[in-house]
Amino acid sequence: MNQKHWYDYLWIVSAAYLILGFFNILFAWLGLLCFFIPLILSVATGQKSYCNRYCGRGQLFSLLGGRFGLSRRQDIPGWMKSKAFRYGFLVFFFLMFFSMLWNTYLVFTGMKSLSQAVTLLWTFRLPWHWAYHGTLFSPGVAQFAFGFYSVMLTSTVLGLVTMVLFKPRSWCVYCPMGTMTQLICKAKNACTSK
Amino acid sequence: MSPTKRRAVVDQAVCVACGCCVKVCPLSAIRVERGLYAAVDPARCVGCGKCAKECPASVIRMEEVAR
């Protein structure tokens, strides 16, 4: 069997990230690493090395669904692996992300007041005031943290649901970061093969 | 009748290149090619089927091929 590497334990980081968000929402900012590292790696190397090696969330799903058996291990429905769904989900995710950024901007400018809540599945507003202990800078910094944590928690919940229903790492099929990095690799290949 | 062997075949058009198959392959016979899709090394693959079982998109199937 393949040998274990340091990066096979990054699921601990992912789990810690989710837990820290329950104590101080400002930790949510660290989640930006999960956005920038995959993009930088794919742009720089033309590989999906983040997905292939370093994705802690994928490891967490494969641990819970695989080792702990919390998965039915059924095939994912055909439409969920279609390009239409994957690209559609990426666009939807982007729209929701930009609406979150807009909301943050409004709080930065003072046009809106800080909302100490985490929005789950873009719909359900969960009170999250216990994880807010003030911020040294603008309340907008905290608003971004609440918004970003909402994105991370929502995608984790979706991933957990499909982990249980289908294969452990079903999230990888429609993960917006995975779709995006694959598109970057495609673009890079189209350029180099010309 | 010619002898056959079992081998993993990836439907590369729908592969998401996540690399789950690479992690479970006991013979390092599969790898992700340029971040695009997984590719099987037919010389190394012994057709154990671990990758097909692991693949979250279920795009790997086992096939009987001529030796």
Image: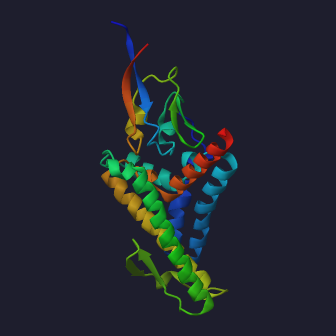
Which residue sits furthest top?
Answer: B1
Q: Is residue A48 in view?
A: no
Please determine whether, in this image, residue A109 is positioned above or below residue A37.
below
Q: Nearer the viewer, residue A61 or A43?
A: A43
**In terms of image quadrants, where is residue A26?**
bottom right
Quarter of the image containing the C terminus of chain A? top right
**Percent position (x, y) of residue A19?**
49, 68
Q: Is residue A5 in view?
A: yes
Q: Nearer the viewer, residue A99 or A66?
A: A99
**In terms of image quadrants, where is residue A17?**
bottom right
**Percent position (x, y) of residue B52?**
39, 35
Q: Nearer the viewer, residue B27 or A9?
A: B27
Q: Nearer the viewer, residue B64 or A50?
A: B64
Please determine whether, in this image, residue A5 is positioned above or below residue A27.
above
Question: In this rendering, would A168 be left or right of A179?
Answer: left
Residue at the spot 49% in from the left edge and 71% down from the top edge: A95
| Total tally of numbered discs in the picture | 0
Residue at the spot 59% in from the left edge and 93% down from the top edge: A110
Please determine whether, in this image, residue A80 is positioned above or below residue A124.
above
Residue at the spot 45% in from the left edge and 66% down from the top edge: A92
**Percent position (x, y) of residue A117?**
46, 82
Query: By what rule are the colours in the image chosen?
Result: rainbow
Which residue sits furthest front?
Answer: A194
**Percent position (x, y) of residue A32?**
60, 66
